[in-house]
Amino acid sequence: MNCIIIDDEATARAIISQLCTNIPSLNILEEFPNAIQAIKFLNQNHVDLIFLDIHMPDFTGFDFIQTLKNPPKIILTTSDANFAIEAFEYDCIVDYLVKPIALPRFEKAIQKAEATASDTIKSNEPTTALETASGNDLYINIDRRLIKLDIPSIYLIEAKGDYINVKTEDKNYTVHSTLKKIEEKLPDSLFLKVHRSYIINIKKIIDIEDNSVLIKKDVIPVSRSNRPELMKRLNLL
Amino acid sequence: MIEQPNLSYINTLSGGDEAFKAKMITIIKNEFPIEKEIYYKNIEAENFKESAENVHKIKHKISILGLEKSYKVADDFENNLKEGSIIGKEEFDAILQLITDFLKTL
């Protein structure tokens, strides 16, 4: 099984790596000090099993799992036994190891991983913090919670580095994702990318000037290349 | 009697692999002072939530070094910090010193 280790503690990564040397069927591909780096790796590599720490700064193990559309098998590693109940709410989690991990317990966890069905992640399947849209709903991952958004209520999406700001009639949300990913989840009939950093809901436009649109109180730039498509989509008199 | 740190877990894990043992000791000697310093900064600034996270990380090293009773002390202190209390700080700081002194002997 191809494995990766995600733990912000170098000591913990070294221990798991050493434990893996006792099991010939395990092939460690990479070790990561944080989950964000691992997401990028999972997008490009075939991974069967992840050793995942729960307690990590900024982005916890559970946050990480929720970003995976088709997670591989996961063995949680933690110093805290209190998360066990939450852990088993996830089908992908095959075992839960409390540190310090002893070899016999580790071997048992690997046996469990090998025994479970081989619904492994494919290397080219992207991971995302955005769950599949169904009808008018879009689920976004915020602080371990999947929050349902009513798609027509979204009026603006703005790119901010590795994050996007999703603005709705009621509330604004910051999500770890990209404009490209959310664009794929939204209906073309309602949404249009008008600039490399902005997607707008064309039904929410108040007015349009030369190279900008007014949506709610936001003035959004329209790039020259996207303007013809925007004009085509409007019901012009 | 105060319990003393030991390398029993690392020895068992190494299975006689001296290179691994040396690597582990190097990693711990590098990582522990950094974790300790971050903890001291956070506790001094009364960032109790962050301090609790720091204690949580350090707990792993406490257990690796075979300090079972100290692990319980650290666990209680972590829970107190989560509640905004520093009860148990002196005992925890003593454990940090104990480990610091032990690592100097390696």
Image (cartoon, coloured by chain):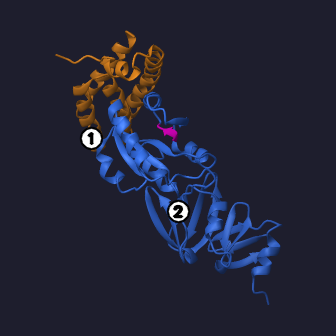
Instruction: Answer yes or no: is residue A54 visible.
Output: no
Quadrant for the C terminus of chain A in the image: bottom right
Is residue A3 inside the magenta stretch? yes
- Residue indicated by mark 2: A173
Q: Residue at x 25, y 39 (%)?
A: B80
Comparing B42 with A158, the one in front is A158
B4 sits to left or right of A168: left
Q: Position of residue A217 (x, y in %)?
A: 62, 71
Chain letter behind tag 1: B
Q: Name above or below for residue B94 compared with residue A88.
A: above
Q: Residue furthest top?
A: B105
Mark 2 in CB contact with mark 1 (< 8 angstroms): no
Q: Name above or below for residue B28 compared with residue A229.
A: above
- Residue indicated by mark 1: B79
Chain letter behind tag 2: A
Binning the other alpha carbons within 10 Å of mark 1 as few (below 14), some (14 to 19) or many (20 upward) gives some
The blue-tinted chain is A
Looking at the rendered structure, the kind of residue marked 2 is: Tyr
Mark 2 vs mark 1, CA separation in Å = 31 Å
The quadrant in which residue B99 appears is top left
Q: Residue at x 79, y 78 (%)?
A: A231
Is residue A76 inside the magenta stretch? no
Secondary structure beneath dot 1 equals helix
Comparing A58 with A46, the one in front is A46
Q: Residue at x 27, y 44 (%)?
A: B83
Q: Position of residue B104 (x, y in %)?
A: 39, 11
Is most of the magenta stretch helix, strand or loop? strand
Q: Residue at x 62, y 64 (%)?
A: A182
Q: Which residues are magenta?
A: A1-7
The hue used for chain B is: orange
